[in-house]
Image: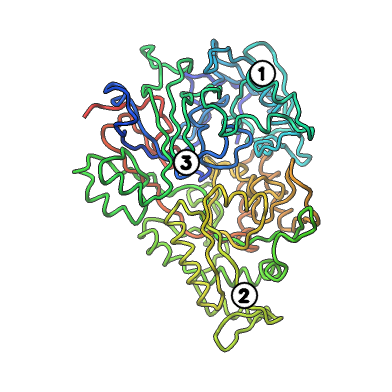
């Protein structure tokens, strides 16, 4: 990827164009629902209000501390740049322009003139300095977003300085291809509202910021810079937003945006309930699952809605084992040592990969509306390594799976139950989130596939917030059916380093020590994990596209050979939207509401 010398990006110029294909699962997919009469004040409000749904309530109102893909932040905050949801191009947001130096190590951002926070206070370069230096780069604040700022082999951080009230200069320790795109995810926070909580400490010496802006905070006290501001929150029920009167966007005629004045984010955990609400006319939009596609397609004309197809979704859908062999601060192993020996045996993981009938998953669970996925990168990525080019694949072959297990010292008893070499029955628990029916169905089929090779797998179906705590904090799980993705990662794989780098905040299959946590004893990254680390660092500073393809091909080979996770099936990105919603620009990258600021509601 080449950067032009002294290149200046402006709102009216063509931005860094990258035709991104897929959407990372880490993005919140919003589902617009109709308005209940008891939630409306006037007919005018009803005509200019949308109710959106989320499968899980927010876990916090504090963005840097958030680890859930479900939250309120896409309405409340913006970064210096934004991403066009159709093209993937970087576009100006809080920064109206940026300049990159010839040596590719300095970037100067110029903020828009007259920016304000939702409480009317001015937003200046001081807020940018505070956000990066005092929060994201603060070692006392355990935020996953610090990973975005680790650069090069030394994992050094950038430095930044204020040039004037509208300009901030970032200096990178070495050229780093993904940095500019990262500034989209690193939203800017209000210094005047949060500085005191960062500078003051509790009885344990931790910043008060760690206990600031939890979900028990009065919503109207949360200060943002995005299109909306919170006005109320009812736990497990809904969050209500009102248009931010100080938001910077306006249309060509000078009309303030967004056009929609009021939003309600409704917590609806069950996808079945969402489907029922949509079919009864209560919902304006719904994510279309594969099992519901035929029914909804037949009814689209009568229901006055359109089903949009964005192509294959981004990210990976996978099943994987807990490979962590470390101990907690009490000296207790995270994983039962008997199970850990199975999970850390490559032949065992390979046998499981051959035992999974992914063609049946595609046809039964996704109704044929998906593609079998072999690689941790999507098939439309320019870095994708195909099976024809040498990518290792695991076609369904239960007999081969059994032979691999026998060769590795496992055996079968008279009931055809799998036993290890010490006579222990091979059985473990599959963890899966409860909010997504198709994910639970997927776990059930995996359970059935494993039973065909003598493995007993029991399901543990929990809410997603609880699942995240087990994966990333307590680390007490055996096997997980999940997904992971970051918007734009197919064209910039380094965005996936949160998951694949051994020190990444979402490196769940061998989650290492994280800042602010109790100590972890005896944690070790394997040789192949360290090789992935090396490849990602090499890819981040390599500008030649041919060399980047070589680097990320090697990464894909390691994943498919070592099998920390087994890729399954990628569903199509489908969304049904009532025709009364205008200016929809649907894509798998941005979803339905990436351009929420310009959406309008037409009166029926």
Secondary structure category for the residue under label 3 = loop
The percent coordinates of residue 177 (x first, y second) are: 64, 35
Residue drawn where x is 57% and y is 89% of the image: 414
Res 293 visible: yes
Looking at the image, residue 402 lies above or below residue 202: below
Residue shown at the point (50%, 69%) measured from the top left = 447
Alpha carbon distance from label 3 to label 1: 40 Å
Which is more foreground, mark 2 or mark 3?
Answer: 3
- Quarter of the image for the N terminus: give it: top right
Q: Nearer the viewer, residue 153 or 338?
A: 338
Whether tag 2 and tag 3 are in contact, CB under 8 A, the answer is: no
What element does badge 1 sit on? Answer: strand
The residue where tag 3 is placed is 236
In the displayed orientation, state which residue is furthest to the left: 302
Q: Position of residue 119 (x, y in %)?
A: 53, 16
Mark 3 or mark 1, whichever is nearer to me? 3
Image quarter for residue 306? Answer: top left
Asked if 301 appears above or below 390 in the picture, the reply is above
Q: Nearer the viewer, residue 531 or 245?
A: 245
**Residue that mark 2 sits on:** 426
Q: How is the image coloured?
A: rainbow
């Amino acid at each position: 990827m080449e950067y032009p010398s002294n290149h200046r990006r402006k709102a009216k110029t063509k931005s860094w164009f990258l035709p991104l294909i897929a959407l990372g699962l880490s993005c919140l997919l919003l589902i617009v629902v109709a308005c209940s009469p008891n939630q409306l004040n006037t007919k005018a409000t009803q005509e200019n209000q949308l109710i959106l749904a989320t499968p899980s309530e927010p876990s916090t109102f504090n963005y840097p501390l958030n680890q859930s893909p479900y939250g309120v932040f896409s309405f409340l905050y913006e970064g210096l740049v934004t991403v066009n949801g159709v093209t993937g191009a970087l576009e100006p947001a809080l920064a109206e322009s940026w300049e990159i130096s010839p040596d590719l190590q300095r970037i100067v951002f110029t903020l828009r003139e007259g920016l304000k926070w939702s409480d009317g206070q001015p937003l200046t370069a001081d807020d940018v300095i505070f956000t990066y230096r005092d929060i994201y780069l603060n070692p006392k604040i355990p935020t996953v977003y610090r990973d975005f700022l680790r650069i090069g082999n030394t994992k050094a951080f950038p430095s930044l300085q204020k040039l004037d009230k509208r300009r901030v200069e970032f200096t990178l320790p070495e050229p780093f291809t993904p940095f500019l795109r990262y500034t989209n995810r690193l939203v800017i926070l209000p210094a005047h509202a949060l500085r005191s909580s960062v500078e003051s400490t509790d009885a344990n010496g931790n910043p008060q910021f760690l206990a600031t802006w939890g979900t028990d905070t009065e919503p109207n006290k949360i200060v943002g810079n995005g299109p909306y501001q919170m006005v109320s929150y009812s736990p497990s029920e809904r969050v209500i937003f009102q248009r931010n009167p100080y938001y910077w966007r306006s249309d060509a005629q000078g009309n303030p945006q967004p056009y929609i004045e009021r939003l309600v984010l409704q917590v609806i955990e069950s996808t079945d309930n969402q489907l029922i609400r949509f079919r009864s006319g209560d919902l304006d939009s719904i994510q279309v699952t594969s099992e519901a596609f035929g029914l909804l397609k037949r009814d689209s004309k009568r229901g006055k809605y359109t089903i949009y197809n964005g192509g294959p979704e981004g990210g990976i859908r996978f099943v994987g084992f807990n490979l962590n062999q470390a101990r907690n601060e009490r000296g207790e192993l995270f994983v039962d040592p008997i199970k850990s020996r199975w999970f850390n045996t490559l032949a065992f993981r390979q046998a499981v990969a051959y035992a999974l009938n992914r063609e049946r998953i595609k046809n039964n669970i996704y109704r044929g509306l998906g593609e079998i996925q072999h690689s941790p990168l999507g098939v439309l990525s320019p870095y994708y390594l195909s099976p024809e080019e040498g990518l290792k694949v695991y076609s369904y072959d239960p007999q081969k799976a059994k032979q691999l297990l026998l060769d590795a010292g496992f055996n079968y008893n008279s009931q055809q139950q799998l036993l290890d070499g010490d006579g222990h029955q091979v059985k473990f628990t599959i963890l899966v989130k409860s909010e997504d029916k198709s994910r639970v169905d997927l776990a059930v089929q995996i359970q059935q596939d494993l039973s065909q090779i003598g493995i007993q797998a029991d399901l543990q179906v929990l809410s997603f917030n609880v699942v995240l705590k087990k994966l990333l904090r307590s680390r007490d799980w055996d096997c997980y059916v999940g997904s992971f993705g970051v918007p734009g990662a197919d064209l910039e794989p380094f965005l996936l380093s949160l998951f694949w780098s051994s020190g990444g905040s979402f490196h769940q299959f061998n989650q290492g020590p994280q800042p602010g946590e109790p100590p972890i004893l005896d944690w070790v990254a394997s040789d192949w994990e360290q090789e992935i680390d090396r490849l990602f660092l090499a890819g981040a500073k390599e500008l030649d596209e041919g060399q980047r393809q070589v680097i990320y091909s090697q990464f894909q080979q390691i994943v498919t050979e070592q099998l920390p996770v087994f890729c399954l099936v990628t569903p199509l990105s489908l969304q049904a939207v009532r025709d009364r919603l205008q200016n929809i620009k649907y894509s798998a990258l941005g979803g339905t509401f990436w351009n929420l600021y310009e959406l309008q509601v037409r009166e029926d």
